[in-house]
Amino acid sequence: MSLDIEQVQRIARLARIEISPAEAATARDQLNGIFGLIETMQAVDTAGIAPMSHAVDMVQRLRPDAVTEADQRTAFQAIAPETDAGLYLVPKVIE
């Protein structure tokens, strides 16, 4: 598929983008290049190839899921204006 200048200008108008004729020609060439790449990629036979979740087949290193800080809840709530049953009380915003 290849685009001509009129199609590029129509796409720009639909997208509410103002482009000059020179910019439309540049955009046409870039879009046609993208369409050419897509056609090349679609021509590749991928039968029998399992889909991958990522282009690079590697495992992410994760840290252990463990608590690393001491519980400071009581210290933080001691300086709060109002608390109740371990919750912070704040003024009502929506009526």
Image (cartoon, grey):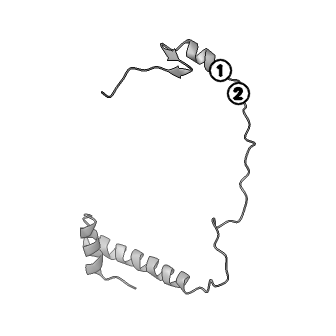
* Residue 32 as seen in the image, left or right of residue 51: left
Q: Which residue is mark 2?
A: 69
Residue 57 versus residue 27: which sits nearer the camera?
A: 57
* Residue 29 as seen in the image, left or right of residue 87: left
Which amino acid type is marked by label 2? Glu
Residue 10 versus residue 70: which sits nearer the camera?
A: 70
Q: Is residue 64 above or below residue 56?
A: above
Callout 1: SS: loop
Q: Is residue 77 above or below residue 13?
A: above
* Residue 44 as seen in the image, left or right of residue 39: right
Residue drawn at point x = 71 percent, y = 54 percent: 60
Report how many numbered discs are placed on residues in the image. 2
Q: Residue 66 appears in which quarter of the rendering?
A: top right
Residue 35 versus residue 27: which sits nearer the camera?
A: 35
Q: Is residue 75 above or below residue 13?
A: above
Residue drawn at point x = 67 percent, y = 79 percent: 49
Contact flag, marks 2 and 1 (Cβ < 8 Å): yes
Residue drawn at point x = 34 percent, y = 26 percent: 93
Tell me where residue 74 appears, x and y as whole percent: 62, 16
Q: Image quadrant for the N terminus?
A: bottom left
Callout 2: SS: loop
Q: Is the residue marked by circle 1 packed among few (<14), some (14-19), or many (20+) residues within 10 Å?
A: few
Tell me where residue 82 appears, x and y as whole percent: 48, 14
Q: CA distance from mark 2 to mark 1?
A: 9 Å
Tell me where residue 81 appears, x and y as whole percent: 48, 13
Q: Which residue is mark 1?
A: 72
Q: Image quadrant for the C terminus?
A: top left
Q: Is the residue marked by circle 2 packed among few (<14), some (14-19), or many (20+) residues within 10 Å?
A: few
Residue 13 versus residue 66: which sits nearer the camera?
A: 66
Tell me where residue 68 appears, x and y as whole percent: 73, 31
Which amino acid type is marked by label 1? Gln
Residue drawn at point x = 71 percent, y = 24 percent: 70
